[in-house]
Amino acid sequence: MAEDAESAENENIVTIHRKITAAFEPFDYESKNTVDVRELGTIMYSLDCFPTQADIREFIAEVEENSSGTVHLDKFLPAMTKVLLENKFPPIPRSKIFQAFKVLDKEQKGFLEPEELSKFMMEEGEPFTQEEMDEMLTAHTNRKENVIYYDKLINKLTADAPK
């Protein structure tokens, strides 16, 4: 019985290692098992982890190679495995995101105008850059009405969206 549990746990870790390596490799442009630290947030997001920018900076400090601006897979793999096993940066539930949009939508219209969303996203919390905002608005603004239906946006952005 104990051997079966240990075997299952080892299999789980092997699966996690494969998943992490698969997320890491596309950013290893020189095939040296290293990535630029600026890619770590993207890699973590692709692994369904949603850390804050402060969390990412803390993680970088833990895994970066001698302030070189790079992270080696050998250092990243165990640290990221621990993050995944502990479910350290889970996604924010859809219901909570929906509540946040409803607070912004003072008239309860079901949508926000791009300027409203842009102003909030660039000035509050962890601000988006203009480039990030432009990309998001281009992808999610209803072109005919020039509004963002946040229910549709949330469905695209969340893992627990209704099927």
Image (tube, rainbow, N blue to C red):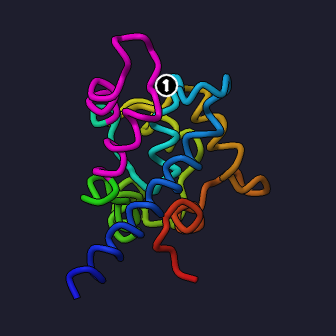
Between 129 and 45, which is closer to the camera in this rendering? Answer: 45
Q: Is residue 124 above or below residue 83?
A: above
In this figure, what is the number of numbered marks?
Answer: 1
Q: Residue at x 55, y 68 (%)?
A: 155
Q: Position of residue 69 (x, y in %)?
A: 45, 15
> What secondary structure is the stretch in magenta mostly built from?
helix
Q: Is residue 47 left or right of residue 136?
A: left
Location of the C terminus by quadrant is: bottom right
User: What amino acid is found at the position of numbered circle 1 in the picture?
Assistant: Arg
131 or 77: nearer the viewer: 77
Closer to us: 114 or 163: 163
| Residue placed furthest toward the right | 144
Quarter placement of the N terminus: bottom left
In the image, residue 92 lies at what x, y percent? Answer: 35, 60
Name the residue beneath numbered marker 1: 38
Q: Position of residue 120 (x, y in %)?
A: 42, 39
Magenta range is 56-83
Q: Name the secondary structure under disc 1.
A: helix
On whether residue 42 falls in the magenta region, the answer is no
Between 145 and 52, the residue placed more toward the observer is: 52
Residue 62 lies in the magenta stretch? yes
Instruction: Look at 47% across and 34% down and name the residue there.
Output: 73
In the rendered view, tell whether residue 60 sits above or below residue 155: above
Residue 103: x and y, percent? 34, 58
Q: Is residue 127 above or below residue 49?
A: above
